[in-house]
Image (spheres, rainbow, N blue to C red):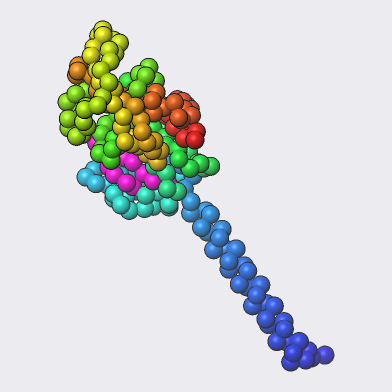
Amino acid sequence: MRASPSTAAACRLQALRRLRQLAALALFGGCAAAGAQSVSLVGSFGNKALLVIDGAAPKAVAAGQSQQGVKVVRVGDGSAVVSVGGQQQELRVGASPVNLAGKGAASTVLQALPNGQFVTEGRINGKLVRMMVDTGATMVSLSRAQAIQLGLSLQGGRPIAVHTANGVVQATEIMLRSVRVGAIERREVPAVIQDSSLPIVLLGMSFLKHLDLQHNADQLTLTARY
């Protein structure tokens, strides 16, 4: 028994719709599979980072380029900053792979140096600086030389005395327009400019108190609380 022309046309239309649905599912599944779940840095040369994504063979990815949703922002000596889903992660050679699954917004993962310190690149008033996380520092702390280099003005600042490991030093308390680490930015952050020398900017509690800090082995996850 032959189907009527209208019935045959309806069957063909239904089959075509089914094929489109299957194609869409296959495309969605392929995209989901392409999303990286973990990434680690095994080397760097020039402006290229040698990344291991999901345990696969290392791939050289240049700054500004992406691989499986992992974009290389910049490459340093034995380190690299990558962006995944709009959030930045810092990778270091020899560190544990960073788990990318389920990352929320405004979160940044730092990798520890061999001495256990967490040092990262950040921005003060939009200018790039190196910072070390220091939960023992009441405020973000800079030396006078660093402040001059960043173009910070001490006019209107409040003179204070700061207790350091080397004793009491004179300092000036000022307000920074902005402090940014990875995807996290805070505005109007109190800071102290010390008369003594500091080898690196200290990322103190005037910035960190607004974050949740999760320490896991050689990784420190900073997540904006509000």
Give the camera-side residue of 192 and 208.
192
**Displayed quadrant of residue 150:** top left
Look at the picture and state if 73 lies above or below 213: below
Mark count: 0
Residue 196's spot in the image, x, y percent?
A: 20, 16
Residue 19: give x, y in percent of width and height: 62, 73
Magenta region, mostly helix, strand or loop? Answer: strand
Q: Quadrant of the N terminus?
A: bottom right
* Magenta-tinted stretch: 72-84
Q: Nearer the viewer, residue 94 or 31?
A: 31
Picture residue at 31% right of the left edge, 40% below the top: 80
Q: Residue furthest top?
A: 167
Is residue 172 at least partly visible in the picture?
yes
Name which quarter of the figure residue 193 lies in.
top left
Can you say whether 221 is above or below 24 in the image? above
The image quadrant that residue 151 belongs to is: top left
Nearest to the observer: residue 99 or residue 151: 151
Q: Is residue 3 left or right of residue 65?
A: right
Q: Residue at x 24, y 46 (%)?
A: 47
- Say which residue appears at 54% left-offset and 63% top-offset: 27
Q: Position of residue 146 (x, y in %)?
A: 20, 28
For image coordinates 49% across by 35% down, the residue present is 226
- Is residue 40 shown to the viewer in this render? no
